[in-house]
Every structure is written in C-alpha cells, then in structure tokens.
Amino acid sequence: MGVQVVPLGGVAASGRLAAARGSGTYVRGAVGLVRPDEGRLTSFGGGQVVVDLSSGALPGSELVTEVMPEVGRQLRRHHLGGTGCHPAGLPELRAALAARITAQGLPTRTDQVLVTAGSQQAVWLIATALAGPGTVTLVEDPSYRGALEAFAEAGGRVRGAPCTPAGVDLNLLEAAVADGDLLYVQTALHNPTGAHMPEPQRRGLAGLAARHGTFVVDDQSQAELGWFRSDPLPGRERRGPSGRWSGRAPRPPPALVPASALA
C-alpha cells in the first residue's frame, strides 16, 4: 500500500483525481487547458496550449453586428405581417443565392435553392435522401468527418478513394465508381487537407462522372475560406452534364428532395 501512496499523491496534486467520501476516487477531466465557458474539446495533455487544434470553429466576426440592424429592418418591412414560416428559406435570400450561383456558371432557379441551417444539415439531408440501405457512397480519403457520419448513419456503405495533392486519385476512383451510387467530393477547398482541385483534375472528374452516369455531390461549403484570394474558389459548377453537378450540393429528383440543397 505504501508503494502506491506516493504516485497517487502526485497524481492527486496535479488535479487529475477527484475523491468523493463513500464513493471512491475517480480520474477527472482535463484541468486548466481551456476556460470552462468555451465549450471546446480538451485533452489530458499537460501544460499551456500553444496552438489549439481541438475545434475548427472560428471566432465571431464584427461584420455580424454591422449587418444585423439591416437584417432586422428588412424582416420588419417584408415579413413581420406573415407567419414567418419559410421552410426552404426566405424568398429574397433564395433568389439572391440563385442569381449568384448562376453568375458562377451553373444556371439555377430560385425554386432549386434550399437554405439550410449550415452545411452539415445540407449533407445530412442529402445522405438521408440518397444514401439509404443498399447504396454505396464513394468519398475522398480523407474526407470531412461530418459527411462520413451522415452517410454512414443513413444506412448505406461508405468507400474511400485515396487523395493526392491534386485531389482524389482519378485512376483509383475510376475502378471503384462503377459500384457506387453517389460520389461526395470537395473540389473547391477540401476539408481536412485544405487542397484545391486544379482545373485539369476537375475536368477529368467531370468526364469520369459523365462516362459512368455517377450522381455527384460537390460540397463547396469551404469555397470562400481560402486565405490567398478574395473570391470563392471554383468547383464543379462549370463542368458536367445538366442535373449531375451543383455548385454546393446535388439536384436530386423532386420525389426525394423538393429543391437542391445549398450548403
């Protein structure tokens, strides 16, 4: 017993043990790594955090406080007298998004835009509609964790095609795509690698999808996060057969989803 007292005493002094009378001694969570009100993931690593990689959430922007008064004015002027229920998004917002996507190269009508509560909800809706039991979804390896979870939880199988510095390996993808029902890619700005798929690679991917009739989801939710340019990085919106490519997400049959999801 005396052999254990010294090491346990040192661990307790570090704050990693919590003792409750009558209940025993337990290992407690990380201490001193983050403020309790941050709500971020922590680890058991000791010492001061130099670079916090526990979360991809960016700090708030002052731009929000600047635009909110105008948003409030627009809502009072146009929507206060109604129910405020717009399941597909505010009509004005959908029209503006459709015009923007059209200007980027993909002709889009307002009724083809579905505004979601973030890109993760858009991916979840797509997975629920198109990736059920018996389906195979092809993804880049590595890929966005939230998308992997959404497609797996939908009940289908998920298969990965390795990535190169220029994006997904088209040769390996060609061999796998014949068995796939859905292809999920991030051509504009890849999460988690940060890679942008060059134009020749995007052209090759479009040709591959056309040859096999593959339904493609091009997630461009990260397109405007590139630090080296002010305009959004291009994706697949200018390539591929009509109805197969969307600037943000697929355009499913109306029986599955009433409008295309915009992440």
Image: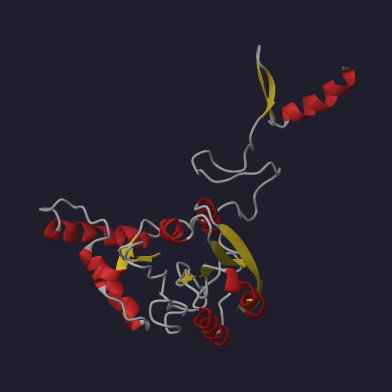
How are the residues colored?
Answer: secondary structure
Extreme residue toward the left, this view: 81
Q: Position of residue 205 (x, y in %)?
A: 55, 81
Name above or below for residue 208 compared with residue 176.
below
- Residue found at x 52% / y 51%: 153
In which quadrant is the N terminus drawn?
top right
Q: Is residue 63 left or right of residue 163?
A: left
Name above or below for residue 9 compared with residue 47.
above
- Nearer to us in this view, 11 or 198: 198
Q: Is residue 81 left or right of residue 72?
A: left
Q: Position of residue 136 (x, y in %)?
A: 56, 63
- Nearer to us in this view, 184 or 253: 253
Q: Is residue 156 left or right of residue 163?
A: left
In which quadrant is the C terminus drawn?
bottom left
Q: Position of residue 178 (x, y in %)?
A: 58, 74
Extreme residue toward the front, this view: 134
The answer to whether residue 143 shows anywhere in this view is yes
Name above or below for residue 64 compared with residue 31.
below
- Residue found at x 21% / y 52%: 85
Image quarter of residue 27:
top right
Name above or below for residue 200 compared with residue 93.
below
- Residue found at x 15% / y 57%: 79
